Each structure stands twice: as C-alpha cells, then as structure tokens.
C-alpha cells in the first residue's frame, strides 16, 4: 500500500517537473521572440533607391535636358517605368511637366498612388515607412516644332520589401 | 534509512531539473547570439550594397567584390530574377534583395573576387 502511494507521488512529481520545464521553455522562447524583434537589424536603403530611381527616370525622360513629348506615346502615360525599362515593383513614380506659367502640360505616372498616402501615414514607422524623393528641375519641352522652357516635378516613393 | 533514500532522490531530481533548465537557457542564449552575431546583418549589408551599385551603374560598368573582406567571407553571389543573393560564411540567402536596373546583370568568379558586370 505504502509502495503504491510512493509510486503515485513519484509520478506526480514527474508530471509536475514536465510542467515546470514546459513553463521554463515557454518563458525562454518568449524572451527570445521579444529580443529578436528588438535586435532585428534592418538596413534602410529605400531613400537611396528613390534618389537613384529619380535620376534614372529623369535621364530617361529628358536626356540632355530636352523632354520630347512627341516621343512618349499616350499609352505610356500611366506606365512611365515600363517606358524607361525599369522594374515597376515597389515603386510609385509621378512626373508632372509644367510650362513657364506653371500649368501642367503632361503628366506621367506608374505604380500605386496610395504609396504616397501611406508615406504620410507611416512617417517614422521603421521598415513600414517608404522611401521618398521629390525633385524639380528645369527642362526644354519639345512638342512638334516648338520648344519651350519648363519644369519637371517628380515624386518617387519606394515601398517596403518583404 | 528511508529518510536518506528520499533525500538522495530529491537531490537527484533537483540536479536533473537544473541540468534541463540549463540546457533550455543554453539553447536560448545560443539562439539569441546567433541572431545577433552578424552573419545575417553582413548578408543584408552586402545584398543591399550590391543592389544599389547595380541600380546606379551604367551599361558597360563592372565592379569587383573581394571574397574575403571585413564583412566576412563571401562564398557565393547569385543574380537571378532581378534579385541579388549573397552567401556569407555559409549562410545561404533566402530571399535576396531586388534591384531595378534596366540593364542585363551577370556575375562571375575571378580569383579572389566576384566580378559583377552591367551590360
């Protein structure tokens, strides 16, 4: 009878030990998980990508400072990155061509225009904060036989990469 | 006599317990250290630096990357489907990093360097 009780007690102790070990493991993994989040090192290059993409699009649209609107067909109005042969994933590009009076002569874009809104919403939110570049420069706008002085306003947003 | 046996049994259990808890925490410490020891960080730095170099490069440019450098030993560099994959200290790249260059990019091993060509 005494033996039987001792066996039961030993079994209970064993079960309790398993329970404690499981508890310790859960705590250890919880600490690991939390520390992983804090120590996850994310190197941010999206602003640099936005700068490079701005330069690439600018050079593609206005090589040597002349933007020839006759060359860019209407079908590329909403696919300017495809026109320039650049990858369109993760990017939003908007280009406004303005004349001397500041009126929009032409507008080109590609990508999710919501990216610009997301940028405002996630400002400073680490890896969810997209890279952005806005750039304005003067160009000669060529259309038909006329050439006028104008400006190009560009906005490039680079979304996160997972 | 019975008292002595019981004492030994408890001591034995406590020792087993301590060893097991120690093992769990050793795994935990090594996992955390592995997370922070930098292989992944080095890989991320290299992949992103190479992607930026490719993006900024003009056609006809070539650049060399030393296999053994301050960022560790680079075992392999792969360029496929618009992504750069770098294997650093045998840590194989899982997802790489995308580049957006319009040019054709290739990589070859030459002596103690990897040469990346943009054409």
Image (tube, rainbow, N blue to C red):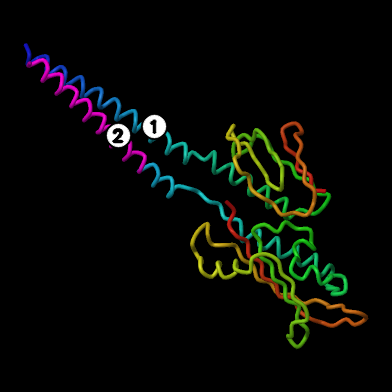
**Residue B90, relative to residue B16: is it above or below?**
below
Name the residue at 70% across, 60% down.
A52
Q: Position of residue A129 (x, y in %)?
A: 54, 62
Residue A115 appears left or right of A63? left
Name the residue at 32% across, 39% down.
A26
Q: In the image shown, does A35 or B1 lie closer to the viewer?
A: B1
**According to the image, label 1 marks what residue?**
B27
Give the dominant element type of the magenta stretch: helix, strand or loop. helix
Locate the N terminus of chain B by quadrant.
Answer: top left
Circle 1 SS class: helix
Q: In the image shown, does A67 or B53 lie closer to the viewer?
A: A67
**According to the image, label 2 marks what residue?**
A22
Name the residue at 45% across, 47% down.
A39
**Residue A130, relative to residue B76: is it above or below?**
below
Residue A56 appears left or right of A132? right
Q: Quadrant of residue A144 in the image?
A: bottom right
The magenta stretch spans which residues? A1-30
Name, please, the residue furthest toward the top. Answer: B1
| Chain name for mark 2 | A
Q: Where is residue B54 in the image (x, y as percent from the top left)?
A: 73, 50
Circle 2 SS class: helix
Q: Quadrant of residue A150 in the image?
A: bottom right
Quick check: is B21 in the magenta stretch?
no
Quick check: is A25 in the magenta stretch?
yes
């Amino acid at each position: 009878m005494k033996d039987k009780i001792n066996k039961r007690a030993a079994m209970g102790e064993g079960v309790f030990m398993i329970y404690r070990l499981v508890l310790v493991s859960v705590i250890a993994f919880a600490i690991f998980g939390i520390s992983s989040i804090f120590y996850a090192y994310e190197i941010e290059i999206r602003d640099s990508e936005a700068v490079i993409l701005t330069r690439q699009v600018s050079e593609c649209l206005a090589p040597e400072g002349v933007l020839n609107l006759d060359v860019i067909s209407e079908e590329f109005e909403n696919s300017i990155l495809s026109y320039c042969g650049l990858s369109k994933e993760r990017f939003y590009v908007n280009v406004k061509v303005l004349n001397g009076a500041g009126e929009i002569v032409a507008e080109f874009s590609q990508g999710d225009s919501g990216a610009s809104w997301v940028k405002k919403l996630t400002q400073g939110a680490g890896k969810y904060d997209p890279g952005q570049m806005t750039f304005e420069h003067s160009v000669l706008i060529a259309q038909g036989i006329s050439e006028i002085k104008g400006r190009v306003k560009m906005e490039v947003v680079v979304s996160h990469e997972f | 006599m019975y008292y002595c046996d019981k004492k030994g049994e408890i001591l034995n259990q406590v020792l087993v317990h301590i060893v097991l808890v120690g093992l769990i925490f050793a795994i935990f410490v090594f996992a955390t250290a592995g997370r922070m020891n930098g292989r992944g960080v080095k890989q991320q730095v290299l992949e992103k630096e190479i992607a930026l170099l490719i993006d900024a490069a003009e056609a006809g440019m070539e650049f060399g990357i030393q296999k053994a450098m301050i960022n560790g030993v680079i075992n392999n560099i792969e360029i496929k489907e618009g992504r750069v994959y770098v294997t650093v200290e045998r840590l194989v790249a899982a997802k790489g990093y995308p580049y957006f260059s319009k040019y054709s990019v290739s990589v070859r091993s030459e002596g103690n360097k990897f040469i990346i060509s943009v054409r």
